[in-house]
Image: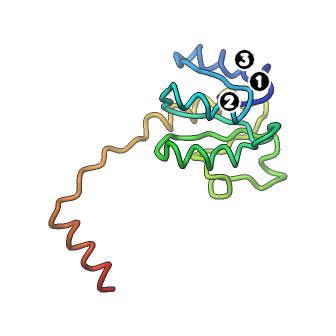
Amino acid sequence: MVDDNEHGLIARKNVLKQEGFVSITATSAEAGLELLHTHHFDLVITDYRMGGMDGIAFIAHLRQRTPGTPIILLSGFVEPLGLDERSTGADAVLSKSANEAASLVRTVNRLLTRRPVRKPVKKETRANMLAVRSIG
């Protein structure tokens, strides 16, 4: 979890700990990116508005380094700024509110269990697909 508000990090970490999740926290996007050198994360939760790099820039860096990692963006400005999955690059955008804890737990569970098992593409099918693309 990445947020420059330490109290928010502690509160969310405790909520997720009660649900059986282990969390590592960072108080800036830059510190969060440094953690990628030493840790693998199943999911990343980030705040939108932080000093230095904001959440959207952080998400862009994450997508380059770990493209398949699910990301949740939290913000107290979801509606006023029109933040959504398409505009932010996050897999889920949640509003900081009185219902935040329940929404966060529900969304974490959904994102961690939705990973589809992809069957490998047969070589001949893939070759046919590439041939069609090159002709068309």
- Tell me how far mark 1 sits from mark 2, CA to CA: 16 Å
Q: How crowded is mark 3: few (under 14 residues within 10 Å), some or many (20 or more)?
A: some
Q: Residue at x 55, y 48 (%)?
A: 63
In the rendered structure, are the residues bearing label 1 and label 3 in contact, judged by CB atoms less than 8 Å apart?
yes
Q: First in sequence, mark 1 or 2: give its number.
A: 1
Q: First in sequence, mark 2 or 3: give its number.
A: 3
Give coordinates of residue 62: x percent, y percent. Answer: 57, 43
List the single residue furthest toward the bottom: 136
Q: In which quarter of the image is residue 76?
A: top right
Instruction: Residue under label 2, please give it.
Output: 31
Check residue 10 in the rendering and tell me which mark sits there, or answer none.
3
Q: How crowded is mark 1: few (under 14 residues within 10 Å), some or many (20 or more)?
A: some
Q: Which residue is drawn at 80% across and 26% down?
A: 5
Give amino acid for label 3. Answer: Ile
Check residue 8 in the rendering and tell me which mark sits there, or answer none.
1
In the image, residue 126 sits, relative to residue 19, either above or below, namely: below
Image position of 59 (left or right of 82)? left
For the residue pair 27 and 120, the one nearer the viewer reads as 27
Image position of 27 (left or right of 63)? right
Q: Is mark 1 on a helix, strand or loop?
A: helix
Give coordinates of residue 2: x percent, y percent. Answer: 68, 30
Give amino acid for label 1. Answer: Gly
Q: How many marks?
A: 3
